[in-house]
Image (cartoon, rainbow, N blue to C red):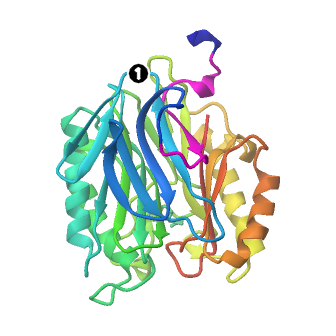
Amino acid sequence: MRQSLHASDRGLRCFFDKSLSSGVGHAAGNVLGRVHYGHGSASALDQGTPLLSVHMAGPGTDPFTEVWVTDRPVRAGARGDLLYAEDGEHIFCATRVPARDVYRDAVHEAYHEAFALIAGLGYTRPFRMWNLVGSITGGNADDMEIYQDFCVGRAKAFEEWSDRIGPMPAATGIGTLSPGIDLYFLASRDGVPQHLENPRQTPAYNYPDRYGPKSPSFARATYLRGTGGDPDTLYVSGTASIVGDDTVRHGDIAGQCEVTLANIEALIGAENLRRYGVEHGFRLTDLDHVKVYVRDAEHLPAVRARCAEAFAGHAEVAYLNVDVCRRDLLVEIEGICR
Ligand SMILES: C=C(O[C@@H]1C=C(C(=O)O)C=C[C@H]1O)C(=O)O
């Protein structure tokens, strides 16, 4: 049975369930966690596994559920505000920071708790993180942009934990439609993550301080070498129209799409991967489970058309109409290659 599976059907994998059923019954594998990109925010253990619901679907986009599955048996639990599920090699962990005036301390605490949980259970290698931030470019009670406020708390947690959990992995930091911050993470026990930078972009952790008092804590991508027969997987961070550290093609949605796609091509291509000892590269048509974040609803048709050309016909692609982490960014794209 196992031999007859395609490589992409083995190991830790995800799919987008657009059927609107939040059930887990039809998933081909054991469910490690689900993230429902819909109309409300909540988190709970549901049918024995973590379910994080985030308010990110709007009038011009369809709700969907990202479902993470594995072949191994899963054990789920809750600790404090954290929900998690583990399969002996991977852990999925989710939490929510409720709306508040200033976020940094609560974000630091949430990250600290998550790192303590995953490291305590032996999953010391985070390889992908999602940070879903309400009013991301709005101001907090101290008049600091909420994304910058968030970055301060996250950076402090990484400074304290990097000796135990290694370098910063691939991530997404994106807007949502309700106040508060939803976080979900994936980490491995034995699989060794290789974190990648983009030759066209300044590493985000080296951005100059004009973007905020603490630079964002993430790598441009993480290549996870599978263990025990799992395939290798490349997790591509949320990528936008940034060259060096500058936003380029201001106000030009077609231009920002081209720069974003060119950035991803350079990141996942053979030349860049060879720098990290990975012997083969990927193309845009290898990208799957793609999320495309579009700031302005009026740009959705143009972005959908360009993405339909760029990605493989069989790729799962979901669109969300939400703010990006800089006001001048109109579009952002992430995905997974294997
Ligand atoms: C678009 C960028 O950053 C965004 C913010 C991230 C974060 O703070 O975790 C990660 C990737 C992107 O979603 C960028 O700086 O290029």
Q: Is residue 139 left or right of residue 104?
A: right
- Quadrant containing the C terminus in the rendered view: top right
Secondary element at tag 1: loop
Which image quadrant is residue 332 in?
bottom right
Give above or below for 240 relative to 233.
below
Is residue 8 on the magenta stretch? yes
Q: Residue at x 52, y 77 (%)?
A: 326
Give above or below for 181 relative to 76.
below
Q: Position of residue 255 (x, y in %)?
A: 76, 73
Residue placed under numbered mark 1 in the picture: 72
Q: Position of residue 304 (x, y in %)?
A: 75, 62
Q: Residue at x 32, y 25 (%)?
A: 88
Question: What's under tag 1, amino acid-wise?
Answer: Arg
Is residue 152 on the magenta stretch? no
From this viewpoint, which residue is outermost toward the bottom? 143
Give above or below for 327 relative to 57.
below
Pick whichever, 223 or 137, lies toward us. 137
Q: Position of residue 322 (x, y in %)?
A: 55, 71
Residue 222 visible somewhere in the drawing: no
Q: Position of residue 25 (x, y in %)?
A: 49, 31
The count of marks equals 1
Q: Residue at x 62, y 17 (%)?
A: 5
- Quadrant containing the N terminus in the rendered view: top right
Specify few, some or many for label 1: CA neighbours under 10 Å numbering under 14, 14-19, or 20 or more.
some
Residue 93 visible somewhere in the drawing: yes
Q: Is residue 15 left or right of residue 132?
A: right
Give, as a single range, the part of the protein colored magenta: 5-22
Pick whichever, 335 or 96, lies toward us. 96
